[in-house]
Amino acid sequence: MTALMKTYSKPSTTLVKGEGAYLWDDTGKRYLDALSGIAVCGLGYSHPAVTEAIQQQSGALLHCSNLYGNELQNALGELITTLSGMDSVFFSNSGTEANEAAIKIARKYGSQRGIDMPQIITTENSFHGRTLAALSATGNKKIHSGFTPLVSGFSHAQYNQIAAIEAAASDSTVAVMVEPVQGEGGINVPAADYLNQLRTLCDQRGWLLILDEIQTGNGRSGEYYACHHNGILPDVMTTAKGMGNGVPIGACLARGHAAELLQPGSHGSTFGGNPLACAAAIATLTTIRDQGLHQRARQLGRDMIQSLRHALEGEAIVKDIRGMGLLIGIQLQQPCAELVEDAKQQDLLINVTAGDTVRLLPPLIISDSQAGEIVEKVALIIKSFAKQSTAMAQP
Ligand SMILES: *Cc1c(COP(=O)(O)O)cnc(C)c1O
């Protein structure tokens, strides 16, 4: 432990094994997982399709550099452009790197149009990653703190407000970059036509629309990619988390003119799209497609939100219950980080984000009864948390 940088607060649980929607810690205790390693393991743990693909690929070719052709990268490229509706793809190793590629596409677009200092509008409360350009894009002072000078060329406007985007615009604006649902920011679901309005605005102004689907993508929102709910496509889309079911891989997808902007020599990655990661992603995405797990996520999400609303009806501590597919947020009236430990005592793994919002991102493969168990336990811990808080508030 002491050898590790203190980037993460000291974990109170050490996980050693997983199967389906269950995880085991180093004492042998079993947990039902309602987090999926933060929207990563959509197929749960030890999924046979992924395990087999990795095992087979590791005996054939793990890595070969992008100096050489790689059949798996071609196959994954075909698959993910078909599922997303985009034209071309660049593979990265993480979400933040996918966003770096997207930002470089926007810069290239600006440079082609003769704009010296191209500006990208992003939103407040957003999260786009931890590398310098991505953290500068992120609309959260805490993420910026201590890392100045930030990368210039970003301005932040209120989320879910078209007028705010327009107000932040200038002659140098080249792109708007948003999450279809803000994940880290608290599962903030915008108005149903927000993305449509953004699409129209970007078309009118000649701006690129960049959608960060790193958390919403790969079936989690109830569609393959969340923008499909709106029947629109961005010019650039990034994704990562759920793409390789735990094997690190991300993608920056582009469409139309934006798909032509990066040329030989303008971008690259040593590991990006290597055979192992591609094999895992092909297995993951074909499983989601063949089993219709995106549709399953849509139905389960609706049911779980409805049951949560029912179970927590009349609880004054609950401010809002919202979500899309299996991205579910329960916002309380007060900070509630301790609920993570309370849930562990009920053998359940959850997360709290934005301080006051319980975030549920269960694997897409959970059964109806596991979904029911998550709802029941989450309602239970919130109710007893509410009782404790009222007791403490009394003199
Ligand atoms: C997690 C996340 C990122 C960063 O991805 P990493 O793989 O951690 O670099 C970026 N954007 C969104 C919306 C995310 O949820």
Image (tube, rainbow, N blue to C red):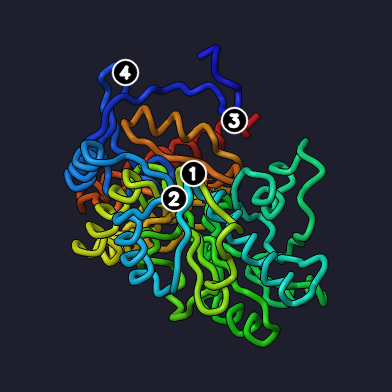
Ranked by sequence position, the earlier of labels 2 and 4 is 4
Residue identified by numbered label 2: 66
Residue identified by numbered label 3: 392
Residue at 37% in and 59% down? 218
Q: CA distance from mark 2 to mark 3?
A: 60 Å
Give the image location of residue 22, x and y in percent: 25, 36
Q: Is residue 353 above or below residue 19?
A: below
Q: CA distance from mark 1 to mark 2?
A: 7 Å
Residue 159 left/right relative to 173: left
Residue furthest toward the bottom?
A: 204
Q: Nearer the viewer, residue 318 or 186?
A: 186
Q: Which mark is residue 270?
A: 1
Q: Is residue 1 above or below residue 117?
A: above
Determine which quarter of the picture holds residue 33: top left
Identify residue type, mark 1.
Answer: Thr
Residue at 33% in and 61% down? 74
Quick one: SS at disc 4?
loop
Identify residue type, mark 2.
Answer: Asn
Identify residue type, mark 3.
Answer: Met
Which is more foreground, mark 3 or mark 4? 4
Quick one: SS at disc 1?
loop
Does residue 47 show up? yes
Determine which quarter of the picture holds residue 334: top right
Ranked by sequence position, the earlier of labels 2 and 3 is 2
**Is disc 1 surrounded by few (<14), some (14 to 19) or many (20+) residues within 10 Å?**
few
Identify residue type, mark 4.
Answer: Asp
Residue furthest toward the front?
A: 67
Q: Is mark 2 within 8 Å of ligand 1?
A: no
Ranked by sequence position, the earlier of labels 1 and 2 is 2
Give the image location of residue 300, x and y in percent: 29, 60
